[in-house]
Image (cartoon, rainbow, N blue to C red):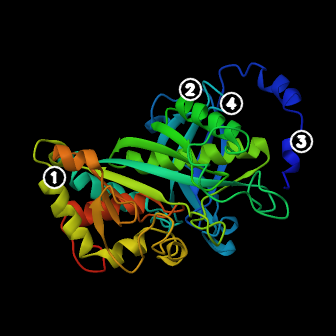
Amino acid sequence: MAMSASAELSKAVKQQYMELPQGDKVQVMYVWIDGTGEGLRCKTRTLDSEPKSIEELPEWNFDGSSTYQSEGSNSDMYLIPSAMFRDPFRKDPNKLVLCEVLKYNHKPAETNLRLTCKKVMDLVENQIPWFGMEQEYTILGTDGHPFGWPNNGFPGPQGPYYCGVGSDKAYGRDIVEAHYRACLYAGVMICGTNAEVMPAQWEFQVGPCEGITMGDHLWVARFILHRVCEDFGVVASFDPKPIPGNWNGAGCHTNFSTKEMREEGGLKAIEESIERLGRRHSYHIRAYDPKGGLDNARRLTGHHETSNIHEFSAGVANRGASIRIPRTVGQEKKGYFEDRRPSANCDPYAVTEALIRTCLLSEEGDEPVDY
């Protein structure tokens, strides 16, 4: 398995420089989503003092022609700070800041889905929507070969790897532990992690997050994972079906509830939402991966703990359904439901917005309403 050359550079030598005092200056790393809707980009600027709020961070710009976001003849794009976190790589007082991207005319870039998501979330803030997203990913070498897999073959069949312990079952735990701790340091609302069904596949969970913070925290958790993998010389893949054949794909199961669903008798509101989702299946499939459903078509086959992409289904404790109602929710008649359709490379802003539009704003049809 190939690893990056950067990983072979001496981290001890680097640490000598990272321990140098930086005076009153602060390094702020601006992070944004590029024109693919999946990739992340970043660059750093120096501020004279530690910013205490998003309002203290200046807008910035970048060359959109190099990020698939504009033409070279009119390439300036604007970075609008939207969410600030502690920097786990440079440490305090340095910051990570997630940005929205605006075009030269100050209209949102095509892959800036945060703007409309925020508008939709603001419409229903009195219902206190909570989300929790389960991000699956696969650790690969720089050659695309799964981490720890034999060079010219396959590991043993699936079965012993899910939540597994031991060198022959858990592939790459150091990366998982480093990412978990870095997220906690940054202030990301990460709430758990586990090894997944396919070897070298892992999952972390973020939430519960209210409204727009779900998308913010999941994107920053992804960025931190990419940076941790960079240090280890490997690659984190969010491809929904990285290995064809009899291997599990990777999703981003999304748990959703409102204040009404979480209170006594909330199961009625859950069932009403599921009914609305069933009438709008194709709209959600298009929103649940960055290629309008084409990526998910490789994963949602009706096998390997997935539903069929062409059919909507729901059930209690059923991991082969589009929507799963946890058994405890069925017993207590309140709580939340899990939408198992979103792909691992989904945009969480698109997923959470779609759920709000269908479940709370009662939208119907294949197109979103313009508010």
Front tag of 3 and 2? 3
Query: Residue 267 — which label?
Result: 1
Q: Position of residue 124 (x, y in %)?
A: 21, 53
Q: Position of residue 197 (x, y in %)?
A: 57, 54
Query: Residue 50 — which label?
Result: 2
Front tag of 2 and 1? 1
Amino acid carrying label 2: it is Glu
Cα gap from disc 3 to disc 1, whole angstroms: 54 Å
28 left or right, relative to 118: right
Residue 44 vs residue 142, the one in the foreground: 142
Circle 2 crowding by C-alpha within 10 Å: few under 14, some 14–19, many from 20: some
The residue identified by callout 4 is: 90
Residue 32 visible, this orientation: yes
Q: Position of residue 53 (x, y in %)?
A: 45, 32
- Secondary structure state at the residue bearing disc 2: loop
Front tag of 4 and 2? 4
Cα gap from disc 4 to disc 2, whole angstroms: 13 Å
Q: Earlier in the sequence, mark 4 or mark 1?
A: 4
Amino acid carrying label 3: it is Glu
Q: Earlier in the sequence, mark 3 or mark 4?
A: 3
The residue identified by callout 3 is: 8
Question: Could you tell me which residue is drawn at 55 percent across and 57 percent down?
Answer: 78
79 left or right, relative to 261: right
The quarter holding residue 173 reads: top right
Amino acid carrying label 4: it is Arg
